[in-house]
Image (tube, rainbow, N blue to C red):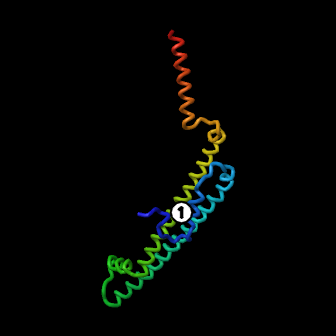
């Protein structure tokens, strides 16, 4: 199955790609990332609200069509002298081509809502990550003199050697 960003949706072309691109954090520009975060989140939230509105409109269309088809099929069966059962009416409604199209539209709209809610949640997570990165920055984690990678093993090795010397000095 392709990743969600490549699935066909009713979303505006390129919208999902723009939203996903906005999730990337440049740790060298944390101040700008913090300034831009509310705008990124607002865009994702607005798109999510629009998708929910579209999905709800399709649901409403489906309900209205179901009611109209129910009356139409019931009247048609009764005019032919047949007793309409709920199962028969339900099968006729579900098999109607317009109803099938609305079902497909509803599934697509629901998927769009799910995708945009996930993107909105990702922007929430981005906000938390920005806070954490800022804390690391304040603590000097990104500075040149911070202890990282190979330098860290040298510092630890030196500390271990000093500790061994002290232990030897006390035992002799």
Number of labelled discs?
Answer: 1
Establish if 140 lies above or below 17.
Answer: above
Residue 140, percent from left and from top: 65, 38
Residue 170, percent from left and from top: 53, 11
Given residues 1 and 76, the one toward you in this image is: 1
Mark 1: give few (<14), some (14-19) or many (20+) Cα within 10 Å: many
Residue 136, percent from left and from top: 62, 41
Which residue ends up furthest to the top in the rendered image? 172
Secondary structure of the residue carrying numbered label 1: helix
Residue 134 falls in which quadrant of the image? Answer: top right
Q: Residue at x 53, y 73 (%)?
A: 57
Residue 61, percent from left and from top: 49, 77
Q: Residue at x 50, y 11 (%)?
A: 171
Given residues 6 and 147, the one toward you in this image is: 147
Establish if 14 lies above or below 24.
Answer: below
Which residue ends up furthest to the bottom in the rendered image? 80
Given residues 55 and 42, the one toward you in this image is: 42
Q: Residue at x 53, y 27 (%)?
A: 157
Q: Residue at x 56, y 21 (%)?
A: 162
Q: Report the quarter where the N terminus lies.
A: bottom left
Question: In this rendering, would 156 be left or right of 68?
Answer: right
Question: In this rendering, would 27 be left or right of 106?
Answer: right
What residue does disc 1 label?
Answer: 116
């Amino acid at each position: 199955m392709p990743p969600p960003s490549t699935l066909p949706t009713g979303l505006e072309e390129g919208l999902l790609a723009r939203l996903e691109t906005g999730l990337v954090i440049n740790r060298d520009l944390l101040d700008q990332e913090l300034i831009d975060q509310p705008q990124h989140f607002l865009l994702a939230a607005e798109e999510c609200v629009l998708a929910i509105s579209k999905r709800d409109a399709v649901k409403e269309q489906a309900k209205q069509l179901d009611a109209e088809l129910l009356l139409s099929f019931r009247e048609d069966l009764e005019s032919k002298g047949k007793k309409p059962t709920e199962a028969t009416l339900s099968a006729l409604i579900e098999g109607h081509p317009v109803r099938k199209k609305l079902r497909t539209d509803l599934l697509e709209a629901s998927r769009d809502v799910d995708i945009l809610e996930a993107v909105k949640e990702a922007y929430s997570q981005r906000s938390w990550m920005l806070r954490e990165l800022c804390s690391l920055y304040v603590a000097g984690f990104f500075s040149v003199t911070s202890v990282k990678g190979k330098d860290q093993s040298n510092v630890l090795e030196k500390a271990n050697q000093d500790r061994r010397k002290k232990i030897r000095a006390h035992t002799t």
